[in-house]
Amino acid sequence: MNKSNAATFTLTDDATGAAYKLPVMPGTMGPSVIDVRKLYAETGHFTFDPGFTSTGSCESGLTFIDGDEGILLHRGYKIEDLAENSDFLEVAYLLLYGELPTAAEKKKFDHDVTYHTMVHEQLSNFYRGFRRDAHPMAVLCGVIGALSAFYHDSLDIHDERQRMVASFRLVAKMPTIAAMAYKYSVGQPFNYPRNDLTYSENFLHMMFAVPAEPYKISPTISRAMDRILILHADHEQNASTSTVRLSGSSGANPFACIAAGIASLWGPAHGGANEAVLNMLQEIGHKDNINEFIKKAKDKDDPFRLMGFGHRVYKNYDPRAKVMQKSCHEVLAELNLDDPLLELAMALEKIALEDDYFVEKKLFPNVDFYSGIVLKALGFPTSMFTVLFAVARTVGWVAQWKEMIEEPGQKIGRPRQLYTGPQQRPFVPVSKR
């Protein structure tokens, strides 16, 4: 970021007439920010921004979003180009190191991640402490948090090598731990990772292979899985990423920070959006009912909402949705499934893309709409949808955590408040109340 303070923003106190000049800090792209770090010291006031939607909480060189234009960049590269031309580990390298790898760097990185995919054997015993019907996200949150009890040699956040080892372990072991959570829930044996498979192939194998028969991995399916992971790898300062950064600002170990991110992601307003799409489709029930529900969606007084359309950040077309739409149709064509719910989804997509109401309001299908359909087609239960999100987002969380820890001026997070409770009052003994 350009630290030039040539530009300033003047804030005037109408009550006293005092004027305060606040530095304006420009970024390489997007809106500039007003530096309010000295605001309280100079004025005695805090800013008030519930949800922090108008507050820049950190300085970052990882991800840029322009919601109005439908742009998502990782380290300056368009998400469409990365999803079309890279695999997930290449994008992971980019997020962690800042540049795309050379062929030699890519080979070494793939090797290093692959050879970290196994988990400590005692960890399998940890799963048996959960009920079989436990939600996989509850299991994931608990097991990731427990990694700090198994890998003591990568907990020193001030040691660069230990930070990197922890980063590799989290990215490599997350698919293994997620697949184990699924296998445990359905009563099937755990599958060990295989070093001859790619990251996405390995995850599919650990999820769906059984000892009784060989598991064949379709290139179309593994490519679709890879795209899902790439498209969800990082998304700027969202709720879960901000949670990871806030947790990490206290000096917490990386495994605890990522567990905190998983807990935040679990919320239906964040990582549960693609699961909500499937629930909505089940509510609609049949493609013959679409027009009725379209009318309900247009009615402001009706609580029904079309899930998977529009986006809080993207006011134009979600750039990830364009890529996911292609994979969605490729997967459905290959599997040739006779699933009424998937037929309903495709019919709903067509109507929404052509309906004047949705086009005018730019309520286009987003990445959650297509990823929910793809994951259902691949055989993932809806309870695993958010887990898949966590598998993909781990590299973004780790990269954001690593960037924050390496920031020279990093401070512990401490949001302020507007207090509206009682003023100071005397304590009255219980006998006199």
Image: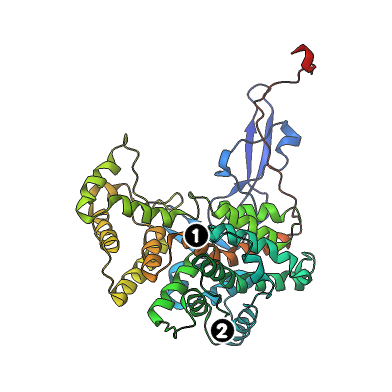
Quadrant placement of the C terminus = top right
Query: Callout 2, which amino acid?
Result: Arg
Residue 97 coordinates in the image, percent (x, y): 64, 72
Direction from residue 49 to residue 18 in the image, left or right: right
Residue at 47%, 74% in the rendered image: 226
Quadrant placement of the N terminus = bottom right
Q: What is the quadrant of residue 51 in the picture?
A: top right
Q: Distance between the residues labelled 1 and 2?
A: 24 Å
Q: Which of marks 1 and 2 is nearer the N terminus?
A: 2
Above or below 22: residue 271? below
Direction from residue 281 to residue 54 in the image, left or right: right
Depth check: 44 or 156 in front? Answer: 156
Can residue 318 be seen at all in this image of the molecule?
no
Direction from residue 142 to residue 427 in the image, left or right: right
Residue 310 coordinates in the image, percent (x, y): 38, 51
Residue at image mark 2:
194
Query: Callout 1, which amino acid?
Result: Thr
Above or below 45: residue 329? below
Residue at image mark 1:
386
Report helix, strand or loop for mark 1.
helix
Q: What is the quadrant of residue 346 in the picture?
A: bottom left
Number of the label disc, if any, that sits on residue 83: none
Residue 236 coordinates in the image, percent (x, y): 55, 57
